[in-house]
Image (spheres, grey):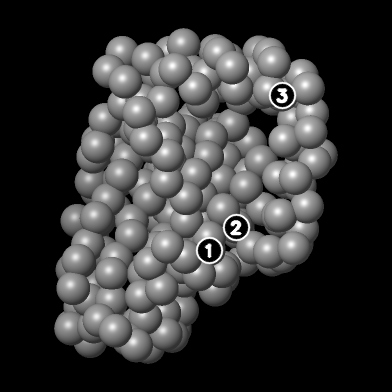
Amino acid sequence: MLHELRTYTLWPGKVPAFLKLAEEKARPIRGNDYGTLEGYWYTEIGPLNQVVHLWSYDDLNARQDARNRLAQNKAWSEEYTSQVFPLIQKQEIRLLNPRLPLKPPSTDGNIYEYRHYRAGTGKAAAFIAGMVEAMPVRERYSQNVCLWQSEAAQPNEVSHLWVYESFEARMAARGESVKDPEWQAFLAKGGALLEEMHSLLLIPAPFSPLA
């Protein structure tokens, strides 16, 4: 399984227009015939004017085949991309290898937090191994949706997605987790492997499967 996280930075004020085109044009045209949509969000805290969407493919070959077929879809180019490209300032992708299975929440109306860390060269695997072992401890406080190691563009990057019922629930969960001695033990070891840490607070679009 391969996941692709696409992050689009839009021109200021263009998020509503972009999401409208995505819901009314992109989703009906694309469906899940060119990769499976797992989640679709816009940023609330972190870099603003961003839209983030997560896709799954069987492997790199399946992703390339899907993108080749999508490029040949006239409705996609004439009804969607021709209208949406002027809204986009920058596009970035991450190709992600899941190290824990993607686990959707059982409820809707949530917020999500995407955290991505740059480990020291050659240290990402050790960080992930420690986090997998410590995950049952951390999930006493909130649910992990997925844990990844990046294939590209940053080979030493680890990222993870969390779900909360509200911003207040996130603050409470993080406050309680850092008091847990078992989680503190992981943080002491894992933190020494990292060089950068970043976080995005994500709000699901109305059509997001992870809602």
Mark 1 to mark 3 CA distance (whole Å): 25 Å
Give the amino acid type for the residue marked by disc 2 in the picture. Answer: His
Is the Cβ of the residue at disc 1 closer than 8 Å to that at disc 2?
Answer: yes
Residue 130 appears in view: no
- Taking the spot 36% from the left edge, 47% from the top edge, the residue there is 113
Quarter of the picture holding the N terminus: bottom right
Please give the count of numbered marks on the rendered protein: 3
Residue positioned 46% across, 11% down in the render: 17
Vertically, is 169 above or below 156? above
User: Please, what secondary structure does the residue beneath circle 1 have?
Assistant: strand
Estimate the x, y position of residue 63 in percent, counting from the top left: 70, 55
For residue 76, the mark is 3
Residue 149 rendering spot, x and y as whole percentages: 47, 71
Q: Which residue is mark 1?
A: 96
- Are the residues flagged by discs 1 and 3 in contact, CB closer than 8 Å? no
Residue 64 or 12: which is nearer the viewer? 64
Task: Please tell me whether mark 2 or mark 3 is closer to you in this view.
Answer: 3
Amino acid marked by disc 1: Leu
Q: Position of residue 24 (x, y in %)?
A: 66, 13
Residue occupying the point 47% across, 65% down: 152
Q: Is 11 on the left-hand or right-hand side of 71?
A: left
Label whose residue precedes the other's in the sequence (1 or 2): 2
Percent coordinates x, y for residue 29 in the rendering: 76, 23
The front one of 106 and 54 is 54
Answer yes or no: is residue 38 visible.
yes
Q: Which residue in the protein does label 2 denote? A: 3
Q: CA distance from mark 2 to mark 3?
A: 22 Å
